Amino acid sequence: MRYFIRWIARLLYGFRAFNESALNVRGPVLLLANHVSWWDWVFLGVCLEEDWRFATSSATAELSWLHRRIMVNRRTFPVDMNSPYAVKHMAEFLQHGGRLVLFPEGRISCTGSLMKLFDGTGFLIFKTKPKVITAYIRGAERLPLSKNPNRKRWFPHVSVHFSNMLVPPQLGAISVTEARTRLTNWLRDRMIQQRFETEMAFGPQSIPGAIAEAVRRAPAHIVVEDASTRMLSYRRLLRAADALSLQWRGWPASPSEPVGVLLPNMNAYPVTLLSLWLADKTPALLNYTTGPSILLTCARLAGLKRIITSEEFVLRAGIDLEPLRNAGIEIVLLEPVRRCIKYGQKAAALFRSLLGLNLSGADKLRSDRTAAILFTSGSEGDPKGVQLTHANLLANIRQMLSVIDLMDTDRFFNALPLFHSFGFTVGLLLPLVTGSFVCLYVSPLHYRVVPSAFYNLNCTIFFGTNTFLAGYARKAHPYDFRSLRYVFAGAEALQPSTETLWLNKFGIRILQGYGATECGPCLTVNVPMHPHSGSAGQFLPGIDHRFEPVEGLEPAVHGANQGRLWVKGPNVMRGYLNPDANAKFKAQNGWYDTGDIARVDHDGFVYILGRLKRFAKISGEMVSLAAVEDALAAGFPQYGSKFALAVIARPDEHKGEKLIAISNQPRLTLEEIRQVIRSRGLSNLALPREIRLLPAIPRLGSGKINYRELEILLRQQATNSAA
């Protein structure tokens, strides 16, 4: 019967099981699997020998004769899950050499992702010291008999992936309560890691291939909408990209030659990106807020010969493209290109979309090919060109999906610019790959409009920088974010005042993360399952980290590691376009120097202390300029919401360096600053020695302070004063 059922499963669902040889181990052994559908026991059972027993609920078995037939038989181990003796009975079975199958979530997932694990599993592992095998059931969340709201299919592909035998860690002399918590967290980490590794090995290997998989599930689904309220279904998105790609294929250029993309957050952006991938071109995402000189620097760095943009956008934004034209770069305007698409080409694109042929070659793109070129913010120097491959971007997306319970029904709202890695990967590619809806809003600076638009669209996922989130909270109505499930903050440190404001006004907890453009960008994130206020969360699966000591840094507290942070993982970039920076990166054997000083506590939560370049060495001790800025950020409510302040370091002949505060508020006094610093518990070394006034503190498109431009303004101010 077992072989017959397996044959039926193979016929209907293309069922496959991987690493079944790991099951050939004597007891005591626990097989622990994710639980996404009513049929999970079948997919596991056809792989197991007869002495394996499934732990079932004796109370649920009494619901009907069918429940009793399925849940009470020679292949099950019925226990009363509400009884304190349930774990004891399972422990006795294991101690006698039993082999037990357990779903540690205790229920079928309502999201399709891993939900919380009951710590009784950790207690069972602690008491019986069994061998552990984890199983990842892939694809069963799409079955009609599953409880999550994701799109269902009658015959999805289902597979089961078994881990090698795992030996739980030896915890030494600790309390039972602490042991069950640690072992439950250990198990969760192993199951998350297994899901990530399985998706990387068996999922699509390119961004267009991953989008194609989502398209096949729901071709008519509305996936993108912009501020003009124009909506694109997957089918229309593919049709437009297919027709547009024909225009790029005629260009006399090698596939490796990048093409610049200079567009705002509008529907044309994903269409253009997908059309370039279909034409085997590499998009280079340009920041239109930097000015002509930086644009030209980035274009030359990437070796661009063509830049795609919009005539209407260029006129409205007042972008000066003459320096680019003078440098011999062709400006390709979408409006005339769209008018040049012939009716026959449109009809052919429509025909191919109906047959599902638009993305037929998507999976042929190599995973190690550069998928996009992004440029670093340039807040402290000239921008660097970052090459992210398809594998890098997909790894980062799958890392996030492994720890965050996103669903097909989620609705993203993205006001972050798409030339920014956070807005690009998290705000566009993630919903395109998962099949969720995303609204692309043109600017994050519309503090009144963004909350209202979010409210009107009933969105559920939101993200931004601290600067933008604070602005929305001040202007929004308390009911604007009523449908919000999760809000994520990144790109700059989340201020406690912003966190408190969102919690008090909307009843919503902001989940802070940390990353870098070179890493796709996400490295750490706080997740709803395990948040820790004040930290940047825990490392995503598949990311290794190490620290280099920093001279003058205060010793870490007990159980923590700190220093200059280096990371390594499948999401870390292919390399830089800048030759010197790329040679330095390649010499590190895949390790990326974040340039940040960080601390990781004994629970794995990461605290970013600041950039090494933004530390001052005063009297032999390292002082974080970012920490001083954070302390001062919410210290002057009397000066209103437009108040801004930055801190820089200058050489000092007595103490090595000194701090200088720069503000746009002429009434601010040095004594006020020092009072706030002392009230925040910082040492006297963190006290600025002087104040300088500027009309405005320059900022990047992401909302972060532009320290490079700030230094230029200060030099100009000093020159004017001397004159």
Image (tube, rainbow, N blue to C red):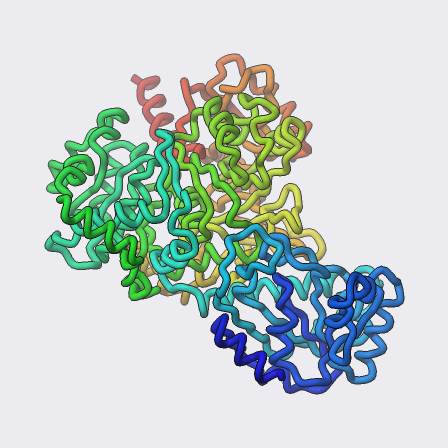
Residue 241 appears left or right of 531: left
* Percent position of residue 175, x then y: 84, 63
Q: Pick whichever, 144 or 251, lies toward us.
A: 144
* Percent position of residue 594, x then y: 46, 52
Q: Pick whichever, 392 or 157, lies toward us.
A: 157
* Percent position of residue 6, x then y: 56, 79
Quadrant of the frame with the C terminus: top left
Image label count: 0
Above-or-below relation of 345 to 29: above
Above-or-below relation of 289 to 600: above
* Percent position of residue 548, x then y: 53, 58
Give me the residue at 20% from left, 42% from top: 307
Give me the residue at 82% from left, 79% from top: 93
> Is residue 677 in view from this perspective?
yes
Q: Pick whichever, 266 or 112, lies toward us.
A: 112
Residue 481 appears left or right of 252: right
Give me the residue at 65% from left, 47% from top: 531
Give me the residue at 71% from left, 87% from top: 26
